[in-house]
């Protein structure tokens, strides 16, 4: 314990800084789940992992009534690299429909912008809240 007496308590400060840094690393490594209203009957969840720089979009199954016979698009998850900053989290996809998801960290709104492979663009806003256990 003699290291704690170093420079009139500098050792204590050093230990406190190490503990603080370790605690904040553990907090950052946790995944935050958003529950989002997208216009579909079931919510979409979004898993944010800032430590890994990823976002996972978890889409529910969707009924496609306009098809004959009616069909169901199965539930699916899509993981992407993301850019995190103080105000936003941004995800860009490069699949058949190029999409950009911009998550406002203050309001919880996700702006979804994209383009169709046949031309044209689209925009939508999802309203999200941090998911919390109910029991």
Image: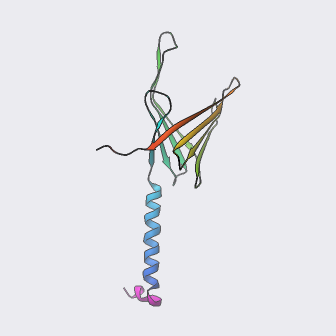
Q: Which residues are magenta?
A: 1-8
Residue sitting at 55 percent across and 51 percent down? Answer: 53
Q: Position of residue 120 (x, y in %)?
A: 70, 26
Residue 3 magenta: yes
Q: Is residue 131 left or right of residue 84?
A: left
Q: Is residue 76 left or right of residue 81?
A: left
**Depicted 121 relative to depicted 53: above or below:** above
Q: Quadrant of the C terminus?
A: top left
**Depicted 31 relative to depicted 119: above or below:** below
Q: Position of residue 30 (x, y in %)?
A: 44, 53
Quarter of the rendering containing residue 33 = top left
Picture mark count: 0
**Looking at this rendering, what residue extends furthest in the top direction?**
68
Q: Magenta part mainly helix, strand or loop?
A: helix
Q: Is residue 112 left or right of residue 128?
A: right
Q: Position of residue 86 (x, y in %)?
A: 58, 55
Q: Nearer the viewer, residue 45 or 130?
A: 130
Residue 112 magenta: no
Residue sitting at 56 percent across and 36 percent down? Answer: 125
């Amino acid at each position: 314990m003699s290291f704690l007496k170093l420079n009139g308590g500098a050792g204590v400060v050093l230990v406190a800084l190490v503990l603080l840094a370790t605690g904040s690393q553990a907090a950052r490594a946790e995944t935050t789940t958003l529950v989002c209203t997208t216009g579909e009957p079931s919510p979409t969840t979004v898993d944010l992992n800032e430590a890994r720089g990823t976002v996972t979009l978890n889409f529910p199954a969707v009924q496609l009534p306009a098809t004959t016979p009616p069909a169901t698009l199965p539930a699916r998850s899509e993981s992407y690299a993301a850019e995190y900053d103080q105000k936003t989290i941004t995800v860009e996809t490069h699949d058949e429909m190029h999409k950009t998801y911009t998550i406002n960290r203050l309001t919880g709104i996700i702006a979804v912008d994209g383009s169709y492979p046949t031309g044209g663009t689209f925009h939508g806003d999802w309203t999200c809240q941090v998911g919390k256990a109910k029991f």
